[in-house]
Image (tube, rainbow, N blue to C red):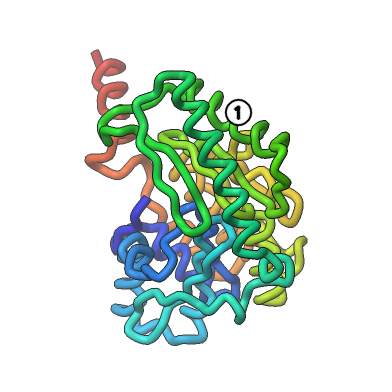
């Protein structure tokens, strides 16, 4: 979900940052060496920060971890994202991974993906990155049945764990709802590295995610943080509103109360609400 400058969630995130709270987006999307991809994704937030001239000590509290745990991005002068050198933030476990071990994992994962998709006759294409490999529909407009993606993810997990070739690097093989990916590492490792980097404890960390099943990429976060399972962007906003109210300050409560009620006009949720309203009126 790309953030728009006039979105309430942008105001809520900036308010949390002003309260001394770190806000980190830990995502499977990995674009090493391409911070502009994240700048585009968070354009509304960055534009609002620039418009409001948010100082560096505040913008430094917003971070993005890409590829589950492999890349860290922060905001630089000019309100654009930049990539932080791994030597500055990666923990000792991450630094111990060798290139040949990563290659071995991805080799096994890629073969397992291709075998599983061939077995199920899925019309997919494959993409291998430096620290990930995945499959997705050949045509963007097509969707693969959720159950088929589940089968692929479970099969790949099993093939990697039972491979005759020893896999020494931790991994995350997950159903992304439109695709299946295998990443080096997982969100537990990414969150742990952030906690060490920022000096934050487990019981001071709350992770909001929507994929806590065995084929999801949020499950391991439960090992190192409090967690909240959300099912939609509106539920994420519900918890942001709750956090702001619980802080109990005049400005945070005012921000919570400024949240628009009901779905935003023109969205799918708004259209559904209009249908319900018309049917009820009839």
Residue 251 visible? The answer is no
Q: Residues within 10 Å of mark 1 (few under 14, many from 20)?
A: some
Q: Residue at x 45, y 70 (%)?
A: 14
Q: Quadrant of the C terminus?
A: top left
Relative image position of residue 67 (x, y in whole percent):
52, 57
Relative image position of residue 9 (x, y in whole percent):
41, 58
Q: Using the rendered view, name the quadrant where residue 19 is placed.
A: bottom right
- With respect to residue 20, does 6 lie above or below? above
Relative image position of residue 198 (x, y in whole percent):
66, 76
Q: Is residue 143 left or right of residue 183?
A: left
Q: Residue at x 38, y 58 (%)?
A: 8
* Relative depth, front residue between 110 and 53: 110
Q: Residue at x 39, y 40 (%)?
A: 126
Q: Using the rendered view, name the quadrant where residue 78 is placed.
A: bottom left
Relative image position of residue 56 (x, y in whole percent):
46, 86
Q: Is residue 87 left or right of residue 177?
A: right
Residue at numbered disc 1? 155
Q: Using the rendered view, name the quadrant where residue 35 is placed.
A: bottom left
Residue 29 visible? The answer is yes
- With respect to residue 158, does 261 lie above or below? below
Label 1: which secondary element: helix
* Relative depth, front residue between 88 and 259: 88
Q: Residue at x 36, y 31 (%)?
A: 124
* Relative depth, front residue between 156 and 272: 156
Q: Tally the numbered discs.
A: 1
- With respect to residue 35, does 140 lie above or below? above
């Amino acid at each position: 979900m790309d953030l728009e400058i006039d979105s309430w969630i942008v105001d809520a995130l900036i308010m949390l940052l002003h309260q001394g709270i770190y806000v980190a987006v830990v995502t499977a999307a990995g674009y090493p060496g391409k911070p502009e991809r994240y700048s585009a994704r968070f354009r509304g937030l960055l534009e609002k920060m620039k418009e409001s001239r948010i100082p560096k000590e505040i913008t430094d509290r917003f971070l993005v971890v890409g590829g589950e745990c492999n890349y860290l991005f922060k905001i630089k002068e000019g309100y654009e994202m930049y990539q932080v050198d791994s030597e500055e933030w990666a923990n000792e476990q991450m630094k111990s991974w060798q290139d040949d071990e990563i290659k071995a994992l991805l080799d096994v994962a890629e073969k397992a993906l291709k075998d599983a998709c061939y077995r199920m006759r899925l019309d997919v294409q494959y993409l291998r990155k430096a620290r990930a490999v995945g499959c997705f529909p050949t045509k963007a407009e097509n969707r693969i049945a959720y159950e088929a993606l589940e089968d692929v993810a479970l099969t790949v997990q099993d093939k990697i764990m039972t491979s005759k070739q020893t896999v020494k690097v931790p991994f995350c093989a997950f159903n992304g709802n439109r695709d299946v990916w295998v990443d080096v590492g997982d969100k537990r490792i990414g969150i742990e590295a952030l906690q060490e980097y920022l000096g934050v404890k487990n019981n001071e960390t709350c992770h909001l995610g929507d994929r806590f099943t065995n084929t999801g990429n949020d499950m391991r976060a439960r090992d190192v943080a409090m967690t909240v399972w959300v099912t939609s962007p509106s539920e994420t906003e519900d918890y942001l509103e709750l956090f702001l109210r619980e802080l109990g300050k005049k400005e945070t409560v005012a921000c919570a109360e400024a949240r628009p009620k009901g779905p935003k006009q023109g969205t799918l949720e708004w259209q559904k609400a209009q249908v319900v309203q018309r049917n009820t009126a009839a």
